[in-house]
Every structure is written in structure tokens, then in C-alpha cells.
Image: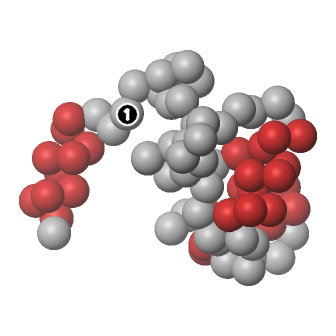
Amino acid sequence: MALGALRGPLLDLVPWQRVINAAGRCSHRDGFWADIQREFLEREGVRFDRRGRVDLKRTRWPGPRREWVTRLRHEL
């Protein structure tokens, strides 16, 4: 949602292509398709598995913290 809120010159400053979803996949963002994002990431050396996912453990992201999930449930 934060990336979708970017406007004007901020779009060029924030490396949107480096932000993938929690499942480790590329996703459509405000005029840019997932295949374009994947292309950019592959040029940077990011590897995808057969299902089109990035190994989040390999990239050292442990997943959402338990308190984030709990807080989100309370807000919903």
C-alpha cells in the first residue's frame, strides 16, 4: 500500500522492484506488471524457483513478526 501511495518524483527514487509480497512473489503495482518486476530483479541476480518465488529465508527475511499479525487481526 505504501508503494501505491507514491507519486511524482518519489516513484523514481524508491526501488519498487525490490519489494516483493510476503509469499516471495512479484505482484502488480500501480501500472507495473509482475513480469517486469521479475525481469528487473533477475538482472540484479535474484533467483526465482519454478513457482516464481524468491527464497525469503535465503534473503534473510524471517517472515512477518507474530505481533504484526496479531495487531492486524485486531484492526480487522
Give the residue at the far left of this rendering.
74
* Front-lying residue, 44 or 75: 44
**Residue 73 at x, y percent in the picture:** 14, 58
**Residue 26 at x, y percent in the picture:** 61, 55
In the rendered image, which residue does mark 1 sit on?
A: 63
Give the residue at the far front of this rendering.
50
Q: Quadrant of residue 75?
A: bottom left
Q: Can residue 70 be seen from the camera position used here? A: yes
* Front-lying residue, 30 or 40: 40
Q: Amino acid at mark 1?
A: Gly
Residue depicted at x 54% and y 30%? 55
Give the answer, above or below, for where 47 lies relative to 76: above
Residue depicted at x 83% and y 52%? 39
Q: Tell me how many marks there are.
A: 1
43 sits to left or right of 69: right
Other residues around mark 1 within 10 Å, as few (<14) / some (14–19) / many (≥20): few
66 sits to left or right of 20: left
Image quarter where the C terminus lies is bottom left
Give the answer, above or below, for where 17 lies relative to 63: below
* Rendered image coloring scheme: secondary structure
Residue depicted at x 82% and y 76%? 8
Residue depicted at x 82% and y 30%? 45
Element type at mark 1:
loop
Q: Can residue 6 be seen from the camera position used here? A: no
Q: Quadrant of residue 59?
A: top right
**Residue 38 at x, y percent in the picture:** 74, 52
